[in-house]
């Protein structure tokens, strides 16, 4: 159950945000509903997320895996639910997304993906456990610009996941909207 009410005041700005959200995602997002109690926070966060869409240096598959690793490490069921759908929409294979919690034991991941998953977990640890060796290993696969983008997307996912987990938000059924791979039906 949500720890912050999901019934904020229906201000003009809030109604505009919910209209845009429903248009893009088919429903209101619970984090937006919780943040709707503070339009300054909601607006600033919305601007941040809109700007993140413009980050194009790092391939979506790596960003998606990094976000999922951070969300899993924090234990944010809302982020895992939405992140599964979002990654699937980017074309990241569903079997890879679902293997993130046990990526070390999976043969599905390439070397760069394994390093990204390790980096996301290391960044999400408290305190962070990023090492010089891990960063150097990533540099064999990523440019400095890509490394900055990776670091910021993991930091952003920490923000998302920690807010949503603290607010008591749970999945909204986004994962259920993912394509089922042929032969699994």
Image (tube, helix red, strand yellow):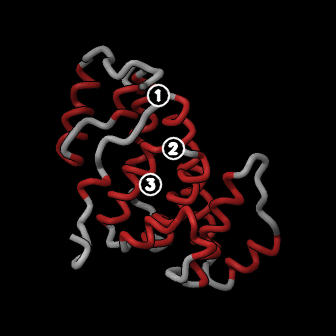
- Above or below — where is 166 with respect to 51? above
Disc 3 versus disc 1: distance between alpha carbons? 16 Å
Residue 153 on image: x %, y %: 54, 57
Label 3 environment density (alpha carbons within 10 Å; few <14, some 14–19, many ≥20):
some
Q: Earlier in the sequence, mark 2 or mark 3?
A: 3
- The reply to whether dot 3 and dot 1 touch (C-beta < 8 Å) is no
Front position in the image: 18 or 53 = 18
Where does label 1 land, which residue?
A: 41
Residue 45 on image: x %, y %: 45, 37
Where does label 3 land, which residue?
A: 52
- Above or below — where is 83 with respect to 114? above
Disc 1 versus disc 2: distance between alpha carbons? 20 Å
Residue 107 on image: x %, y %: 54, 83
Where does label 2 land, which residue?
A: 76
Q: Quadrant of residue 133?
A: bottom right
Label 2 environment density (alpha carbons within 10 Å; few <14, some 14–19, many ≥20):
many
């Amino acid at each position: 159950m949500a720890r912050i009410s999901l019934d904020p005041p229906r201000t003009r700005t809030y109604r505009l945000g919910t209209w845009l959200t429903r248009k893009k995602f088919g429903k209101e997002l619970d984090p937006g509903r919780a943040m709707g109690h503070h339009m300054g926070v909601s607006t600033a966060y919305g601007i941040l997320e809109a700007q993140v869409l413009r980050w194009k240096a790092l391939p979506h598959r790596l960003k998606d895996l990094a976000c999922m690793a951070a969300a899993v490490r924090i234990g944010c069921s809302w982020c895992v639910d939405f992140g599964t759908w979002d990654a699937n929409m980017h074309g990241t294979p569903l079997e890879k997304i679902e293997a993130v919690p046990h990526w070390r034991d999976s043969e599905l991941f390439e070397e760069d993906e394994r390093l990204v998953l390790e980096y996301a977990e290391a960044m999400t640890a408290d305190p962070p456990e990023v090492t010089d060796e891990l960063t150097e290993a990533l540099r064999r696969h990523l440019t400095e610009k890509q490394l900055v983008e990776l670091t910021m997307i993991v930091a952003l996912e920490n923000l998302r996941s920690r807010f949503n987990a603290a607010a008591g938000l749970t999945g909204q059924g986004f994962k259920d909207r993912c394509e089922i791979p042929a032969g699994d039906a």
